[in-house]
Amino acid sequence: MERIQEIPTFKINGFAALVGIIAIASFGIWLGKGLVGFSNINDLFLYTNNLFGIGLVIVALVALKGFLTVQPNQALVLVFLGNYVGSVRTSGFWWVNPFASKQLVSLRVRNFNSDKLKVNDAKGNPIEIAAVVVWLSKIYNLWSTLVVVNYPNLLRRGWGFQFHGRMP
């Protein structure tokens, strides 16, 4: 099995990207204002400006899909055209590649409570035994997203405890 290395992805502060996208859309609207009837469409220069303005507005609208919010103790895994692009672990408002698919991974502390099991000790006294397992998925963040379909169920079956803190 190929070992998957987690890498941080390219991200921009969401507020700075929002200002840039608004500026691009405003410039595109300003260039495309000739479509409303303020200019003569027969002029080739104005016609190309109008088309360029429409293109800028479309680019700004597509770029809006790249905004995301990462909460504390969460990570986001980005996959572009089936290839792993990177992860965002820093909480905040970010802008990333709008064409990448984004999958949220919880890094919060999770609890697994086992059922009560009745056993007898050496003298024959009945004892009820139960276990509470507290676990984090920080080590398996990327692996749990790209390789395993149902990661919590995998740990519930006990298979995840064979690694002793290492990824296979």
Image (tube, helix red, strand yellow):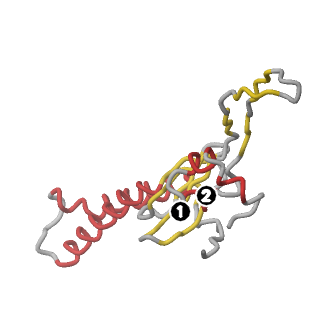
Answer whether labels 2 and 1 touch (C-beta < 8 Å): no
**At label 1, which amino acid type do we have?**
Leu
Q: Which mark is residue 146?
A: 1
Quadrant where the image shows the C terminus? bottom right
Q: In this view, does 28 lie to the left or right of 85?
A: left
Instruction: Indicate the secondary structure of the residue bearing disc 1.
Output: helix
Q: Residue furthest right?
A: 123
- Above or below residue 101? Residue 49 is below
Mark 2 lies on residue: 88
Q: Give 91 or 131, whichever is nearer the viewer.
A: 131
State the separation of the CA atoms marked 2 and 1.
15 Å
Residue at point 57%, 51% (across, down)? 151
Residue at point 50%, 55% (across, down)? 149
Residue 146 location in percent, x, y? 53, 62
Residue 54 location in percent, x, y? 26, 64
Q: Give 81 or 60, whichever is nearer the viewer.
A: 81
Q: Give 59 or 40, whichever is nearer the viewer.
A: 59
Residue at point 60%, 74% (across, down)? 1
Give the quarter of the image for residue 108. top right
